[in-house]
Image (spheres, grey):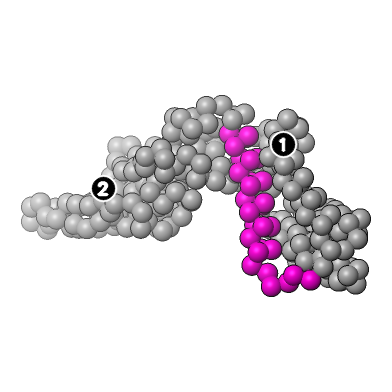
Amino acid sequence: MTESTAGIRPVRRIVTGLNAQGRSVVLADAPSPHAMTLEGVATFGVTDLWRTYQAPARNDGPQDACAGQAITLAPPPSGTVFRVVQFPPDREFVGRWRPERAFASMGESGAQALTLDAVARVAGVSKGGLMHHFSTKEALVQGAIDSATEALHDRIEADYEASSDRAPGSFTRSYIETTLRHAEECYLLPLFELTAREPGMARVMAEHNAWCHEKLEHDGIDPVLAHVAASAADGLWIEIIFRLESAKSWRVRAMRSYLLDMTRKSA
């Protein structure tokens, strides 16, 4: 979820109470500030109006019951949450949500811990809403693998297009830089694990690799050297996503510089 709420309508919240004379008064009348939107879909959001923290509920005192509390799908233990959810049309949702980000819900426990309930909780949507677009766990996994691969592909292509380097070996250098720059993103480890378990789900990844190989082989330097440099960057990427090495370690930084220099000397 993201704190930017420009894409959803403000929800007016009127809070009433009793004054010292026991008469009803309006304590607040303004849009609720407790709102968030789904990352990647600015028109899909939730607004919390009130929370309770025990049963029976206690609402005495001037405090805003939502203040200082993170927006989570589940209510507090023994409590309740009064919430407005704004759903966009399917055309604004399907294909725009980044499902791979839901894999952060697996934490250290790996791909086997993935459940639709956990993904829905992290994404801030209901399980029913999630299943409307991904009817099974397998469909969600496939969508996440494809989305993550396409995101990496787009980054490599965008970084290369944005670079002023057009000397021989420029694509190989861009590949090395982009691969290592994004290696620590949280969803990559479970996605790697899932594609290893289910090779049939890696069709988009195979297409991405074929595109990269074509670019490397026509990069103006020895194509074998280009593949060696890119494969070495891939090896560092694997070490980083398995947390065997930090992207900021001296070894990774030194090897990155060495690989980049290799591509320049070859030219």
- Assess disc 1: are there few (<14), some (14-19) or many (≥20) residues with their C-alpha within 10 Å of its C-alpha: some
Numbered disc 1: secondary structure: loop
- Dot 1 amino acid type: Ala
**Looking at the image, which residue is at 66% across and 46% down?**
149
Magenta segment: 140-167
Of 103 and 166, the residue lying toward us: 166
Label annotation for residue 9:
none
Left or right of 39 on screen, residue 142: right
What secondary structure is found at the residue carrying circle 2? loop
Q: Quadrant of the C terminus?
A: bottom right
**Residue 14 can be seen in this image:** yes
Seen at 73% across and 30% down, the residue is 200
- Residue 140 sits above or below residue 242 on the image: above
Q: Is residue 140 above or below residue 60?
A: above
Image coords of residue 196 (percent x, y): 77, 36
Type of the residue with mark 2: Asn
In this view, which residue lies farthest toward the top?
Answer: 136
Query: How far, Cα to Cα, is label 2 from label 1?
Result: 53 Å
Badge 2 local density, few (<14 within 10 Å), some, or many (20+)?
some
Q: Which residue is mark 1?
A: 202
| Residue 267 sits above or below residue 11 on the image | below
Snapshot quadrant of residue 266: bottom right
Q: Residue at 72%, 42% (x, y): give it.
A: 207
Q: Position of residue 92 (x, y in %)?
A: 42, 44
The residue closer to the viewer here, 11 or 155, is 155
The tag earlier along the polypeptide, 2 or 1, is 2
Residue 252 in sight from this viewpoint: no
Name the residue that disc number 2 marks: 59
Residue 40: x and y, percent? Answer: 48, 50
